[in-house]
């Protein structure tokens, strides 16, 4: 915490207060400890929305932000005995000073204080549906507050998810520096892994390489459970068993990113365990690569965030038609979405504090338009299951290529470009 600067978080709380109606407040809760078994907890990771507004990384906490810009933190008081076991706690006074809150109270006082603090408010904003227990607490506090102020209109509870999500869409310079570092670590790990993967390795062996290289680069954790899928396992989008043997003729799909100071990266590469693509594998790979290229180019400031999806569908549909997998006219393939037999996910997602950032794709019934410093993944894929109506030589091939793309006024920038994506580059790296 020696180099912690609370100005970023104070500014965000001020900004979100301006999005509220008059006489309103916003309540948001922290993550809580989750237990793996008996009394052994998982490593604590703060809720991304809570962290975005505070930088505070302790559990059992709550923030209130009012439309006048005032912000209040509820957190645990210091407990010197507990600190012997679990480490330093800021406490009420320390948290107020360090994180720039106007007021700070002991979290044990929330049931008494919050109804008093919100009584007479017109609106109470929260992130409805994120935490059912917290939703129930908010309803209880509002009911108590309404009873305390019987001669005023009842408090309206409103969802603030889209407003906060829209704020998180555009990364500030601090966030961009962390995203670049996360992407750099992940890209170097992928590149180094490709240089060291050999025939005979299992999915487990390969996953171990990636996790080790993430830590070597300065990341403590993957940003999601890695996917290391050999052969037909690559056709299972969320395959995470990562424990099967890999045949010499198999492709391996690795979808793995890391987290650096809370910010995520997300990269997928597909490569032959032998170091050499077969003719069929390469033919499909080139279609996916072309879709990746064209979809990346569709990230244009001012254009709809849905354009990369439409572009990927067009390129992949034409590629599937050229390969003979689909016979119908291109217009019919697109209209009836016949490509979904082989391409059954979206082109990508927003990324930042979460690998799937908590931000909308439409707002007030309009598609979000790209603005400078938004970041979206681009990850087209083709997957040919055993049940697919194609010749057996194609079956079991699953290919995805994914990078993290920054929208700028000068055009898209690939933040994970350091790891090769062209088939000949991959073969050269693995030689």
Image (tube, grey):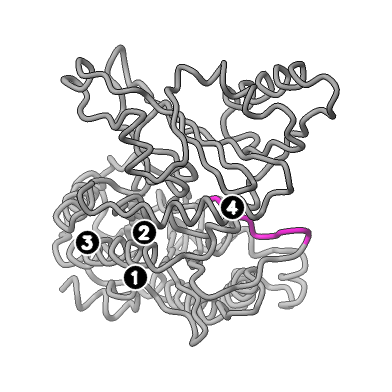
Mark 2–mark 3 Cα distance, whole angstroms, equals 12 Å
Instruction: Kindly identify which residue carries mark 1.
Output: 416
Question: What whole-number distance in Å separates the C-alpha atoms at marks 1 and 3?
Answer: 11 Å
Task: Give the Cα distance between marks 3 and 4.
Answer: 37 Å
State which region is magenta.
Answer: 358-365
Q: Is residue 311 above or below residue 336?
A: below
Residue labelled with disc 2: 265
Q: Earlier in the sequence, mark 1 or mark 2?
A: 2
Residue that appears at 34% across and 22% down: 77
**Marker disc for residue 16:** 4
* Residue 330 included in the magenta stretch of the image: no
> Going 71% across and 66% down the picture, which residue do you hit?
367
| Neighbourhood count class around disc 1 (C-alpha, 10 Å): few under 14, some 14–19, many 20 upward | many
SS at badge 1: loop
Whether residue 137 sits left or right of residue 50 in the image: it is right
Residue nearest the observer in this picture, 392 or 379: 379
How far apart marks 1 and 4 lie (CA) works out to 31 Å
Majority SS type along the magenta span: loop
Measured as percent of width and height from the top left, residue 43 is found at 29, 32
**From where the camera sits, is residue 379 visible?**
no
Q: Is residue 239 left or right of residue 386?
A: left
**Residue 406 drawn at (x, y percent):** 45, 73
Q: Are marks 1 and 2 in contact (CB under 8 Å)?
A: yes
Q: Give the distance between the C-alpha atoms of the residues marked 1 and 2, in whole angstroms.
A: 8 Å
Which is more N-terminal, label 4 or label 3?
A: 4
Which is nearer the N-term, disc 1 or disc 3?
A: 3
Marks 4 and 2 sit apart, C-alpha to C-alpha, by 26 Å
Using the image as rendered, state which of residue 353 and residue 399 is in the foreground. 353
Going 40% across and 75% down the picture, which residue do you hit? 414
Residue beneath disc 3: 189
Residue 248 percent across, percent down from the top left? 24, 58
Quadrant, the C terminus? bottom left
């Amino acid at each position: 915490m020696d180099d912690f600067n609370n100005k970023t978080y104070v500014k965000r709380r001020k900004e979100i207060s301006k999005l509220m109606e008059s006489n309103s407040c916003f309540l948001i809760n922290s993550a809580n400890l989750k237990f793996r078994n008996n009394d052994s907890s998982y490593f604590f990771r703060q809720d991304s929305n809570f962290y975005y507004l505070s930088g505070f990384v302790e559990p059992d906490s709550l923030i209130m932000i009012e439309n006048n810009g005032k912000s209040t933190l509820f957190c645990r008081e210091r407990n010197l005995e507990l600190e012997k076991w679990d480490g330093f706690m800021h406490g009420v006074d320390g948290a107020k000073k360090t994180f720039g809150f106007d007021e700070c109270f002991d979290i044990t006082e929330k049931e008494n204080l919050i109804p008093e603090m919100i009584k007479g408010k017109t609106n109470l904003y929260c992130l409805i549906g994120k935490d059912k227990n917290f939703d129930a607490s908010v309803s209880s506090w509002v009911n108590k507050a309404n009873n305390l102020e019987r001669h005023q209109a009842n408090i309206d509870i409103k969802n603030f998810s889209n407003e906060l999500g829209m704020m998180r869409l555009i990364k500030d310079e601090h966030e961009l520096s962390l995203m670049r570092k996360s992407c750099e670590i992940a890209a170097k790990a992928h590149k180094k892994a490709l240089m060291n993967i050999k025939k005979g390795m299992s999915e487990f062996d390969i996953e171990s390489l990636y996790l080790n290289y993430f830590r070597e680069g300065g990341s403590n954790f993957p940003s999601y459970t890695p996917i290391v899928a050999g052969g037909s396992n690559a056709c299972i989008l969320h395959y995470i068993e990562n424990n099967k043997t890999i045949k010499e003729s198999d492709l391996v799909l690795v979808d793995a990113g890391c987290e650096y100071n809370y910010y995520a990266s997300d990269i997928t590469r597909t490569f032959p365990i032998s170091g050499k693509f077969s003719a069929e594998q390469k033919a499909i790979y080139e279609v996916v690569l072309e879709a990746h290229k064209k979809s990346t180019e569709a990230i244009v400031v001012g254009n709809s965030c849905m354009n990369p999806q439409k572009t990927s569908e067009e390129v992949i549909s034409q590629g599937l038609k050229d390969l003979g997998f689909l016979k119908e006219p291109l217009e019919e393939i697109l209209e009836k979405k016949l490509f979904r037999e082989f391409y059954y996910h979206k082109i990508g997602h927003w990324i930042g504090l979460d690998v799937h950032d908590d931000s909308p794709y439409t707002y007030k019934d309009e598609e979000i338009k790209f603005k400078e410093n938004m970041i979206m993944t681009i990850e087209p894929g083709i997957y040919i299951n055993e049940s697919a109506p194609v010749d057996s030589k194609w079956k079991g091939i699953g290919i995805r290529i994914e990078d993290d793309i920054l929208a700028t006024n000068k055009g898209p920038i690939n933040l994970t470009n350091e790891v090769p994506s062209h088939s000949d580059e991959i073969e050269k790296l693995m030689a």
